[in-house]
Amino acid sequence: MTTTKPRITITLEKEAYALLQRMSTQRRKSMSAIVTELLDAAAPSLERASVLMQRAQLAQEDVEEQVEALLRPRVPEELREAWREEEEEMRVAWRASRPNLIVQARQPAARARTAASAQKQKKPKKGARGRT
């Protein structure tokens, strides 16, 4: 049976699949038909939720633009440029220091291993006493 309608594939938890299978058997409809009915019933609520989420996103963008507009006149362009340069210098310095941090973190462990192996070497072997 071919259709021109869009198709999707979904992955369900075992419990949801079992419930859908039971509903399908009880109502003598395919699982696909059951899911379609459920989505059709939920469509008005889903549409409202989608509109609200879109409005919230637009409102957030509007607030961000307003905050930026409020800050823009109070901060001279030269100062903003200096901040950008300082931030970039800090990023470069941080990146350059990362390998050193890793090496420094490993050094105490390496020293401990070296000290432990030196102590093992200093211990006299059994039976070595008294022999010349």
Image (spheres, rainbow, N blue to C red):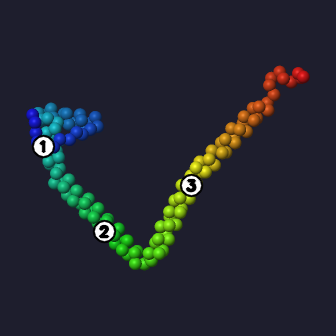
Looking at the image, tell me whether mark 2 or mark 1 is earlier in sequence order: 1
Residue 33 image position (x, y, % from top left): 13, 39
| Callout in the foreground (3, 1) | 3
The amino acid type found where label 3 is placed reads Ala
- Disc 1 crowd, CA 10 A, few/some/many (<14, 14-19, 20+): few
Can you identify the residue that label 1 sits on?
5
Q: Which image quadrant is residue 49 in?
A: bottom left
- Residue at disc 2, secondary structure: helix
**Going 77% across and 31% down the picture, which residue do you hit?**
121
- Residue at disc 3, secondary structure: helix
Separation of marks 3 and 2 at Cα, in angstroms: 38 Å
| Callout in the foreground (3, 2) | 3
Can you identify the residue that label 2 sits on?
62
Separation of marks 3 and 1 at Cα, in angstroms: 56 Å
Q: 56 or 8, which lies in front?
A: 8
Separation of marks 2 and 1 at Cα, in angstroms: 37 Å
Can you identify the residue that label 3 sits on?
96
**Going 54% across and 55% down the picture, which residue do you hit?**
95
**Going 22% across and 56% down the picture, which residue do you hit?**
50
Q: How many marks?
A: 3
Instruction: Tell me, yes or no, whether the two marked residues, 3 and 2, touch with CB atoms within 8 Å.
Output: no
